[in-house]
Image (spheres, rainbow, N blue to C red):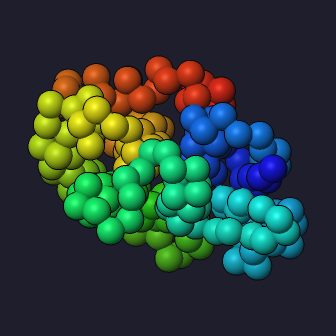
Amino acid sequence: MYTVIGNARTRAFRILWMLEELGVPYTHIPAAPHADEVRSHYPAGKVPVLIEDGTALTDSTAILTYLADKHSAFTFPAGTLDRAHQDGHTQFILDEMDALLWTAARHSFILPEQDRVPDVKNSLKREFVHSLERLQQRLGEGPYLMGDTMTIADILAGHCSRWAENAKFPDAPAPLQVYFERLRNRPAWQRAGQT
């Protein structure tokens, strides 16, 4: 049994969604970042934290990769060309979407007020529009980034799409909207608590 620590409004949602897709049992502790429940397993206080057999795993993409490899689902085998392409999509999303959203969040409410540069968000939003265009090219005919196979790259993209919406970032072009809706309409997404 797994234990997931982290509020579903954070990157912990990625892990909850993956576990729901896998259909494996887990316990969820919806703690906020830096809460005692988090710091007791990860002194940095960041979420998500996944506990398995008393071992704490951190960082959402690392946890997703571990779960996908362990359960042989939502991933291609390591050492294959398909895995290299999948990893390319994953890194693109982390670099071109997640990083922009995280920087905007830091300058909105995470950094001390004197360290925030609110005007940086306009630049981040412009760059995000270009990232969406590149993601659309990567998606091609879909339905997923790796064709007919949904992978952890799609989980990251789906989560970033909702994050961007909540952060009032520009809307995705219509073909990407269809892709994002396809992800959000999955029953596992709904069960994971992202509405």
In-image side of 134 versus 45 (left or right)? left
Answer with left or right where residue 126 lies relative to residue 6. Answer: left
Left-right relation of 73 to 32: left
- 104 over 40 or under it: above or below: above
The answer to whether residue 43 is above or below residue 37 is: below
Q: Position of residue 86 (x, y in %)?
A: 30, 55
Q: Nearer the viewer, residue 175 or 62?
A: 62
Judge by depth and name the residue closer to the eye, 37 or 147: 147
Q: Position of residue 33 (x, y in %)?
A: 71, 61
**Residue at (37, 53) in percent of width and height:** 76
Query: Which residue is depicted at the point 14% across and 37% down?
Result: 140
Nearest to the observer: residue 182 or residue 123: 182
Above or below, comparing residue 89 to residue 40 in the picture: above
Q: How many numbered marks have been drawn onto this rendered protein structure?
A: 0
Query: Residue at (40%, 45%) from the top-left corner?
Result: 151
Left or right: 76 with respect to 106? left
Residue 7, percent from left and from top: 71, 47
Percent x, y of residue 177: 28, 27
Is residue 69 visible from the viewing direction of this image? yes
Check the picture and name the quadrant holding the C terminus.
Answer: top right
Q: Is residue 109 visible?
A: no
User: Residue at left 65%, top 27%?
Assistant: 191
* Image vertical order of residue 148 relative to residue 18, above or below: above
